[in-house]
Amino acid sequence: MRRVLLVDDEPAVLFAMKEVVRTAGHEPVLARSAQEALDRLEGVDAVVTDFAMPDLDGLALLQAIRERDASMPVILLTAQGSERVAVRAMKAGAYEYVTKPWDVDEITLVIERALETRGLRLRNRRLEAERAIGKGFVAESAAMRRLLDAVARVAPKDVTVLVRGETGTGKELVASLLHAQGRRAAGPLVRFNCAAIPAELAEAELFGHTRGAFTGATQARRGFFAEADGGTIVLDEVGELPASLQPKLLRVLQEGEIQPVGSGRVEKVDVRVVASTNRDLEADARAGRFREDLYYRLSVVELLVPPLRDHREDIPALVAEFARRDAERFGMEPVRLSPALVAKLRDADWPGNVRQLENAVARMVALGSGGELGPDAFDARPRRPSGALDQAEEPDVAVRDAAEGLSLREQLDALERSLIARMLAATGGNQTEAARRLGIGRTSLIDRMKRYGLT
């Protein structure tokens, strides 16, 4: 069911329009002013607005809507004899205009065509995104459509972007889209994980080093910024960047300059920076855990990738795409997911977001024998392979169960996996906080997560 926003300051007109939209099988959303319309714009697929209103007129509302969502079709209602207004509206980007008093069949047809146009525009945008990154991109929900629209508007503008979102939401995909749809698409795309490399090596990796700059530096090496010259560098988990490197990154953003370790020479680089994080960097900056000036430089434009729980309607399309991709990757015949299985996946909790869902589908496809997978293929509780533990198990119970027929090494591995899984659950998947509570480094935690299949 599509949602149509109806805007008019006359209650009788709104009531009549509401019945037209409802009879056509769509959901009407009502607003009695332009400001109220802007407040209710989220999640709608078309707008029908009167031209003459007390606060902002229809043209001003049209311009405000197009600034937020250029693909939104807006239909203006104008009085008879106001052809000049109609021409201005069409030049300003209105989808169509209808003169009052309007005919029910005419306005119904115009709304249907507008909704069809909206659908085509969104599908074309998704296809462009898929071509750009070489893989399927699901954006059926209003939340993901808004994100895709924001990416399309920001990508061609050479500004620094901060992509925020929980672990597993697809921040790296958004970063790829920003590069692929931007002016630097022909240039290199370089990724640097700020949490994966020890602080003492991160500076040399980012900015390069000269021969003999430190022990083991047997030859000079270009850094990630130099490799990304003319293209885009993606700084994953930028919130984990060591404090000693933050002023040096700020210099790159302000001046476009880097200085390799061991060199007295400054080099110019032309790089677009896209940073991603699962942390609230604004709060970290206020608390003194992250440089405030660097935060503002990174967040010229800030994009929020929604968690999967906020766009569950995308799950059917996501699992279909994952199953198709996995069957092809595993050399299997096409795999179908039964409606009951899709419903089960849609209703399940996914604290690890899209990445967890993707892994679950891969496991089902790999363990299946092709054909159609039924609801029994998915178990919301992870299976326990070779002594690995369920996340909900207490350590003492786990050790007791694992002791039957398992070696000491297997029992210790099972206990460690259980503790890590429980800590990840307790911290909402925040790897940095989980590592801190466990008393180990984040890189060590990531290695253990990969070993125990917790990624």
Image (spheres, helix red, strand yellow):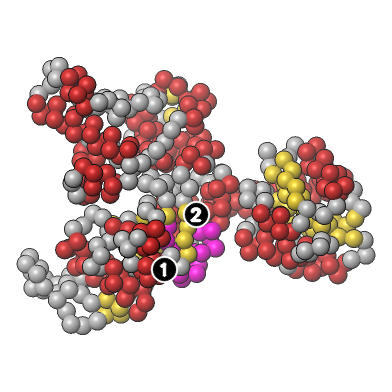
Closer to the camera, 210 or 252?
Answer: 252
Read off the residue under disc 1.
296
The residue under label 2 is which amino acid type?
Ala
**Along the horizontal axis of the image, is 411 left or right of 193?**
left
Magenta range is: 150-163
Read off the residue under disc 2.
129
Indicate the quadrant where residue 371 lies: top left
Indicate the quadrant where residue 87 lies: bottom right
Is label 1 in a helix, a strand or a loop? helix
> In the figure, 324 relative to 113: above or below?
above
> In the figure, 63 relative to 24: above or below?
below
Q: Does residue 327 show up?
A: no
Measuring from the top left, give residue 433's x and y in whole percent.
28, 47
The residue under label 1 is which amino acid type?
Tyr
**Which residue does the image show at 19% across and 29% down from the upper left?**
414
**Along the horizontal axis of the image, is 409 left or right of 19?**
left
Measuring from the top left, give residue 8's x and y in whole percent.
81, 54
**Which residue does the image show at 21% across and 83% down from the upper left?**
265
Indicate the quadrant where residue 21 lies: top right
* Residue 117, magenta (yes or no): no
Q: Does residue 208 show up?
A: yes
**Which residue does the image show at 23% across and 68% down from the upper left?**
244
The residue sitting at the bottom extreme is 265
The quarter of the rendered structure image containing the C terminus is top left
Measuring from the top left, give residue 320's x and y in whole percent.
48, 35
